[in-house]
């Protein structure tokens, strides 16, 4: 977008400059012809005075005499009354339709001075190199100015593209630009509203999943306990006991199906491309190692369990950003990230480090906890080795 805007600005500038140059050329050519016409007219008047005096002195007006007054690019023609014309051409004179001429009528004839049309063209040719240099400078200035304008116009849209990509990965904390461009502002507001709506829907769906799990599994668990208690009765006939055992197996199957449905609803809350756990851990560790490095601190990371499990990166990145921003603000010394994926698809993320204050009252930790709980998980603060504090996020499979 930036390159296209810059190129368009340069082209528009050059076209406007060229159009202005054409108009100016036509105007200047008229002025030059008028000036040269006045100059030729004055020369004709002066030479006519000399010729008139020579005729009065009964001296001949021949080619030798007129040659002294003919310029290199002019023609002098004297037509005596009732006589043959005397014409003298300068060495560079060329007959053309766009030449300039001036005629003075004498008592005994007429005197005409003509100038080649190439004189005007020669004036333009002399300025061609200067005009090209000026045009090149204008193009360079237009390119620089166009790039700055294009950068200022495209920067909000580039940030919006990054925000849209983050929303597609399942993040809610969008970095939206503040801009006066109406189109960019409208897109920014739409993305912000979409993020709020997505998070609200996620929280409602999580509440529904928890409620559905309770409503479905509680009666099934009670029914199975009753059937199990029934099978323990010694007076129960064998056929009835076998039927009760069969019912218990059916209840277990229904309970498993109910659990799968609840898990399926949770996994379907956030879509988007999923990446392996090892890639997620690597990208997060690299980003925050640079961030902590600016504060003179280090960061190490470890991936345990099934490293090929795939996850939607957005929510996990958002949680890590909040916890590691808290580590930058309230931590000291090096930090450590531990990612652990189990066979059931659950993820355990641990941010370990020494703190200067308790995490329980920290705004960033509370915000991270709300995101984790909205995803159906929980965030715990546990004592770590050597006096460190572990902030552990337990996330269900999704």
Image (spheres, helix red, strand yellow):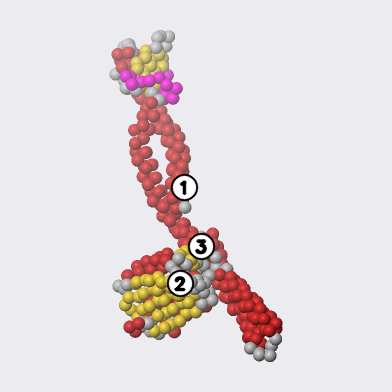
Depth check: give the residue in front, 390 or 229.
229
How far is mark 2 from mark 1, CA to CA?
Answer: 52 Å
Question: Comparing marks 2 and 1, which lies closer to the viewer?
Answer: 2
How far is mark 3 from mark 1, CA to CA?
Answer: 36 Å
Q: Which residue is mark 1?
A: 8
Name the spot of residue 395 as percent of width and height, x first: 49, 75
Residue at x 42%, y 24% (from the top left corner): 99
Q: Which residue is mark 2?
A: 341
Left or right? Give the position of 277 relative to 206: left
Which stretch appears magenta? 90-105
Disc 3: CA contacts within 10 A as few (<14), some (14-19) or many (>=20): few
Earlier residue among tags 3 and 1: 1
Residue at x 40%, y 9% (from the top left corner): 84
Earlier residue among tags 2 and 3: 3
Question: Comparing marks 2 and 3, which lies closer to the viewer?
Answer: 2
Q: Which residue is mark 3?
A: 273
Residue at x 41%, y 48% (from the top left corner): 142
- Which residue is farthest front? 238
Left or right? Give the position of 205 relative to 151: right
Determine whether the residue tagged by mark 2 lies in a helix, strand or loop.
strand
Give yes or no for contact between labels 2 and 3 (Cβ–Cβ under 8 Å): no
The reply to whether the magenta stretch includes residue 99 is: yes
Residue at x 40%, y 65% (from the top left corner): 283
């Amino acid at each position: 977008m930036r390159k296209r805007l810059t190129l368009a600005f340069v082209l528009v500038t050059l076209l406007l400059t060229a159009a202005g140059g054409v108009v100016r050329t036509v105007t200047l050519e008229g002025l030059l012809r008028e000036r040269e016409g006045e100059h030729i007219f004055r020369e004709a008047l002066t030479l006519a005075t000399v010729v008139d005096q020579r005729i009065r002195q009964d001296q001949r007006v021949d080619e030798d005499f007129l040659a002294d007054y003919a310029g290199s690019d002019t023609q002098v023609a004297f037509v005596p009354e009732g006589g043959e014309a005397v014409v003298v051409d300068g060495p560079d004179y060329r007959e053309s339709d766009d030449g300039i001429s001036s005629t003075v009528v004498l008592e005994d004839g007429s005197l005409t001075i003509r100038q080649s049309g190439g004189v005007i063209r020669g004036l333009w040719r002399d300025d061609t190199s200067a005009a090209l240099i000026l045009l090149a400078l204008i193009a360079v200035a237009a390119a620089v100015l166009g790039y700055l304008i294009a950068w200022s116009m495209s920067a909000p849209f580039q940030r919006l593209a990054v925000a849209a990509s983050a929303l597609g990965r399942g993040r809610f904390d969008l970095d939206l630009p503040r801009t006066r461009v109406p189109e960019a502002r409208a897109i920014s507001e739409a993305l912000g509203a979409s993020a709020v709506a997505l998070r609200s829907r996620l929280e409602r769906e999580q509440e529904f999943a928890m409620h559905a799990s309770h409503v479905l599994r509680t009666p099934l668990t009670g029914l199975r306990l009753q059937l199990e208690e029934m099978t323990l009765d010694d007076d129960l006939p064998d056929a009835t006991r076998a039927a009760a055992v069969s019912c218990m197996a059916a209840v277990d199957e229904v309970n498993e199906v109910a659990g799968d449905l609840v898990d399926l609803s949770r996994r379907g809350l956030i879509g988007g491309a999923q990446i392996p756990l090892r890639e997620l851990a690597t990208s997060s560790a690299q980003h925050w190692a640079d961030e902590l490095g600016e504060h003179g601190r280090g960061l190490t990371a470890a991936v345990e369990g099934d490293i090929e499990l795939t996850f939607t990166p957005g929510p996990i990145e958002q949680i890590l950003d909040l916890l590691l921003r808290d580590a930058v603000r309230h931590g000291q010394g090096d930090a450590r990230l531990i990612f652990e994926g189990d066979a059931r698809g659950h993820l355990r993320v641990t941010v370990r480090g020494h703190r200067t204050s308790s995490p329980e009252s920290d705004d960033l930790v509370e915000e991270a906890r709300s995101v984790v709980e909205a995803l159906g998980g929980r965030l715990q603060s546990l004592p770590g080795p050597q006096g460190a504090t572990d902030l552990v996020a337990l996330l269900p499979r999704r």
